[in-house]
Amino acid sequence: QIDEYILAIESSCDETSVAIVKNGEAILSNIVASQIKSHQRFGGVVPEVASRHHVEQITICLEEALEEAGIAPEELTAVAVTYGPGLVGALLIGLSAAKAFAWAHGLPLIPVNHMAGHIYAARLTQPLKFPLMALLVSGGHTELVYMVEDGSYQIIGETRDDAAGEAYDKVGRVLGLPYPSGKEIDRLAHEGEDIFHFPRAMIKEDNFDFSFSGLKSAFINLVHNAQQRDEELDSKDLAASFQASVIEVLVTKTLRACQNYPVYQLIIAGGVAANQGLRDAMQQTLEEQMPDLTLIIPPLRLCGDNAAMIGAAAHVELRKQHTAAMDLNAEPSAAF
Ligand code: KG4
Ligand code: ZN
């Protein structure tokens, strides 16, 4: 069997990334150009700023990815690109680059869903065994996805309001932390204690859905009320209390999902999967309650947005011959 080399492009939000992935499982290169510094002073990602950065970075990343992998365009099997979900202008830059490269080199074009990419980051760490459960936690999504085979996605639960990462970022703003604040809250949480006992929304409800907006409001109200009394609450304890609530809900609901569906593996994916508290809690809970279930959490560099995960997901699409024509468009709210 001949080896497959996919050049993958990701530009859905604020990272420009190009990777070369071999057979859907080995990373030959994974160049990530982050724009975070340019967005921080605005307290969030500014779509127009993101698009402009992608335009500047995409060709540089593409050349670096090929060079680092030691692969010539003639050796490639296909070009993969994120078509959504994401910011429309940002997506269009990646799509244009992918189409141009594919057309110039006579390569097939593979459209990849960004969230499928987050899940398939797991295959870059170890082989997958189906059926499996994936907890997707990012800045825009919080979902439990049941997969009976490659490329089959059944959403069994999701957030009714804010995504987990979104809650982290909004709470971080109240604490005066730079965007995105998940990582810093995670760090502070490890130095504080859960003394505020925020609500654990929907934890007892017999479904696999989540809600984080009530927690966010409880947090903001507590801080504002304290400010009105000229009282300052300890941000470490605030962070620890917030994080304890998020983690307990995520772990409880995910465990319940794994107990209700036959699964060999549990994948935790997306930017919030970088959370050390979540990683530790999930591992400990599974060891105690479901020791036979294999937990896969990609290393930190593969939890955030990157093109290698897009290349891993593209491998599945290519085997199903899911290729796109040159009129492929961006889908800002693409679903699985
Ligand atoms: O997957 P991602 O890089 O972009 C999206 O597709 O949304 O996720 C970004 C989100 C942000 O909300 C960020 O605050 C959060 O992931 N995040 C974290 C941590 N690192 C990143 N949240 C909690 N703990 C972390 N260590
Ligand atoms: Zn993402």
Image: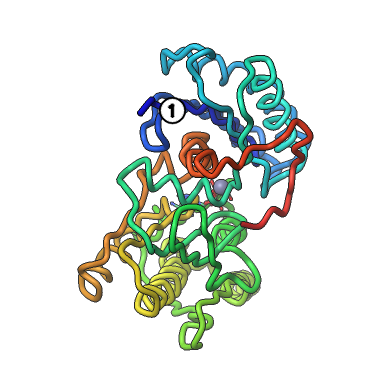
Q: Position of residue 42 (x, y in %)?
A: 71, 43
Q: Position of residue 220 (x, y in %)?
A: 62, 70
Which element is circle 1 on?
loop
Residue 223 drawn above or below residue 69:
below
**Nearer to us in this view, 70 or 220:** 70
Task: Tell me what residue is drawn at x 41 percent, y 64 percent.
Answer: 133
> CB of residue at label 1: within 8 Å of ligand 2?
no
Q: Quadrant of the C terminus?
A: bottom right
User: Image check: 303 left or right of 44?
Assistant: left
Question: Where does label 1 land, which residue?
Answer: 4
Q: Is residue 218 visible?
A: yes
Q: Is residue 40 visible?
A: no
User: Image check: 42 left or right of 315?
Assistant: right
User: Residue 211 falls in which quadrant of the image?
Assistant: bottom right
Q: Position of residue 252 (x, y in %)?
A: 39, 76
User: Image check: 32 left or right of 292?
Assistant: right
Question: Mark 1: which amino acid?
Answer: Glu
**Nearer to us in this view, 272 or 319:** 319
Q: Position of residue 31 (x, y in %)?
A: 49, 26
Residue 64 drawn above or below residue 10:
above
**Nearer to us in this view, 146 or 140:** 146
Q: Quadrant of the N terminus?
A: top left
